[in-house]
Image (tube, rainbow, N blue to C red):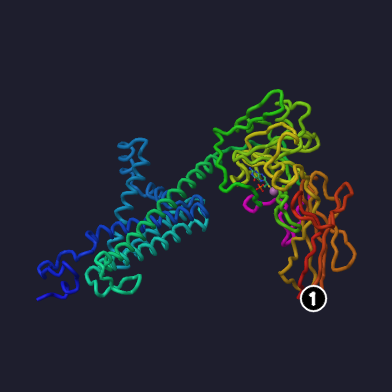
């Protein structure tokens, strides 16, 4: 008598007797446990790849692999460490990573098999591993709360994949056991074409998902790790930089900071400082191989290493940087204490030749800016090469190890980050990155003012309060700021004590509004007596203009 099992198989296989029932059904996975182990390894791969990717985005030192490695180093018993060092010498770290890798693969394989035979045991195992990794990452020194994200999101991605792949593997196995119960997933019919048995289709589906996810995990994981490793080694180099004490510092006058709620800080913290550049990924510059060359129309070309620059007479400067893309009222402005050296002192070493009128500064990533030579050599203007920003080496995003900062010129024509070359040349001869792209070759910062508080869209209460904000006229200095309420007269605002003419100032007026809607406008005048341009201009080709006017709701 035919058994249920053999009845449901088709074609040649009807010959199979019940005696052979224990054997593999046709089309079933030959080694289901082996496949389950691979499923587990791919799930772990997805976990690590997603975690590395998230680490790259939100928490540079949140790499789960490395966190786990450090964690293991911390918990491995002393005798095991000594054994590793005695046996593998300098390769003890490599030995650790390889052992860790093998352990992960074995645990992942077990997880895959568990998920296949007893779901959701595999996912539970993965969640435990994910939780352990997350703990290892967030408890590392210097970790931010964001450091939890790689482990958490990686665990979720790995669990989803583990679930999908194990389910597909089970389905493939089952459709081979009970072909009549499984319909063709594409057209809903059971195919009578022997080549397209449900088992074959399920096998194909399983292998496709497995192939795509493992390839994706390898590409994403390896890519993210390489990108992260490159950055973290530069982070380590940056952390090891010992900035010299400046030979002179800037005195901050009494009353420089007004301390009004809602107004920008006088010094912009590095992490809040706007960032504008063309770099898709932040250039990683190794200070040991970096150099700055001064070339072009000079009598004696100069090459300086990072140590040469650190050994110079570095001083502190306070300069407010502004982007040409800053719209009226916008936030692409920031103020910092820079540690650096005047560019004129460096240029003097090279002796620029007569006839030159421009310096083309070049970044390691090829970006260039054109700065008038006179702006760099003027004794009354401190255009600098900066190595420090607010008491730290330049952050990687802000040009580590060396950038230029020129008071009074928009960043795109002066503030080259990741600087590597200063070419003394002429505007006739050379062109900077933005020049053929619709921006002026020369671009002084336009005198401007901005209302920080109150803000449009955020209603305030009637009664006594303040209107306050910032104003800047780099290299000239702000003489006065005026505010107009609705169609009233322009009222002079009280200004903070300026640090120097190259920095912005804070300003405020007292305001006791009635309920309703009100318009507030602001304008500044510089120390040359020039009034801020009223007429609106777009950011291209050389910076926005216009008086900011905001609509305020008062309750
Ligand atoms: N290498 C390089 N330097 C650059 C840029 C760039 O794209 N690449 N952008 C410039 C522009 S447009 C501005 S406004 C400032 C911004 O500096 P920040 O990102 O440190 O605020 O950097 C300048 N330096
Ligand atoms: Mo800019």
Residue under pointer 1: 516
Q: Seen in the image, is 476 located left or right of residue 119?
A: right
Q: Which residues are magenta?
A: 254-272
The percent coordinates of residue 164 (x first, y second) are 36, 65
Work out whether residue 74 or residue 225 is closer to the camera in this orientation and state it: 225
Magenta segment includes 267: yes
Give the vertical position of 387 relative to 215 (above or below): above
Magenta segment includes 324: no
Q: Seen in the image, is 386 located left or right of residue 158?
A: right
Q: Seen in the image, is 195 located left or right of residue 486?
A: left
The percent coordinates of residue 183 (x first, y second) are 30, 73
The percent coordinates of residue 535 (x first, y second) are 84, 57
Q: Quadrant of the N terminus?
A: bottom left
- Name the element at disc 1: strand
Q: Can residue 255 be seen by looking at this rendering?
A: no
| Residue at the farthest front position | 193
Work out whether residue 394 or residue 359 is closer to the camera in this orientation and state it: 359
Residue occupying image coordinates x 87% and y 59%: 492
The percent coordinates of residue 415 (x first, y second) are 69, 42
Q: Can residue 166 be seen by looking at this rendering?
A: yes
Q: Seen in the image, is 307 located left or right of residue 64?
A: right
Disc 1: CA contacts within 10 A as few (<14), some (14-19) or many (>=20): few
């Amino acid at each position: 008598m035919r058994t249920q099992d053999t009845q449901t198989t088709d074609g040649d296989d009807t010959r199979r007797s019940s005696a052979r029932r224990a054997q593999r059904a046709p089309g079933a996975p030959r080694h289901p446990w082996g496949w389950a182990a691979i499923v587990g390894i791919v799930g772990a791969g997805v976990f690590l790849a997603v975690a590395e990717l998230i680490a790259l985005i939100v928490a540079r030192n949140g790499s789960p692999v490395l966190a786990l490695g450090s964690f293991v180093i911390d918990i491995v018993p002393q005798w095991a460490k000594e054994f590793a060092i005695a046996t593998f010498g300098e390769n003890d770290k490599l030995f650790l990573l390889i052992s860790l890798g093998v352990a992960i693969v074995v645990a992942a394989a077990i997880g895959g098999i568990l998920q296949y035979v007893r779901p959701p045991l595999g996912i539970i195992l993965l969640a435990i591993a994910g939780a352990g990794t997350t703990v290892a990452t967030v408890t590392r020194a210097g970790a931010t709360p964001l450091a939890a994200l790689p482990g958490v999101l990686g665990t979720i991605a790995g669990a989803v994949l583990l679930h999908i792949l194990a389910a597909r593997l089970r389905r493939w196995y089952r459709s081979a056991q009970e072909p009549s119960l499984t319909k063709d997933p594409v057209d809903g019919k059971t195919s009578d074409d022997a080549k397209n048995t449900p088992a074959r289709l399920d096998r194909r589906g399983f292998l496709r998902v497995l192939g795509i996810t493992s390839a994706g995990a390898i590409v994403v994981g390896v890519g993210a790790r390489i990108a992260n490793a490159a950055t973290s080694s530069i982070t380590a180099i940056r952390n090891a930089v010992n900035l010299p004490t400046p030979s002179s510092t800037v005195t901050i006058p009494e009353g420089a900071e007004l301390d009004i709620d809602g107004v920008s800080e006088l010094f912009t913290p590095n992490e809040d400082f706007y960032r504008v550049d063309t770099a898709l990924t932040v250039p990683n510059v190794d200070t040991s191989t970096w150099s700055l060359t001064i070339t072009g129309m000079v009598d004696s070309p100069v090459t300086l290493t990072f140590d040469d620059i650190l050994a110079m007479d570095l001083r502190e400067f306070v300069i407010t940087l502004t982007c040409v893309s800053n719209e009226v009222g916008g936030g692409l402005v920031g103020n910092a204490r820079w540690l650096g050296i005047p560019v004129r002192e460096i240029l003097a070493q090279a002796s620029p030749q007569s006839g030159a009128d421009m310096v083309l500064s070049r970044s390691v990533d090829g970006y260039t800016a054109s700065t008038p030579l006179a702006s760099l050599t003027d004794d009354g203007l401190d255009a600098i090469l900066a190595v420090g920003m607010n008491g730290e080496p330049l952050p990687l995003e802000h040009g580590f190890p060396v950038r230029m900062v020129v008071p009074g010129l928009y960043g795109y024509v002066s503030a080259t980050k990741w600087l590597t070359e200063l070419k003394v040349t002429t505007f006739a001869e050379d062109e900077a990155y933005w020049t053929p792209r619709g921006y002026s070759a020369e671009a002084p910062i336009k005198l401007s003012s901005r209302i920080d508080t109150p803000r449009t869209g955020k209603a305030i209460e009637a009664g006594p309060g303040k209107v306050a904000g910032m104003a800047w006229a780099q290299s000239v200095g702000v003489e006065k700021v005026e505010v107009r309420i609705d169609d009233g007269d322009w009222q002079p605002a009280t200004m903070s004590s300026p640090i120097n003419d190259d920095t912005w100032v804070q300003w405020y007026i007292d305001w006791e509004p009635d309920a309703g809607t009100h318009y507030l406008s602001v304008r500044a005048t510089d120390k040359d007596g020039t009034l801020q341009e009223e007429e609106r201009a777009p950011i291209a080709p050389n910076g926005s203009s216009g008086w900011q006017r905001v609509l305020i709701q008062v309750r």
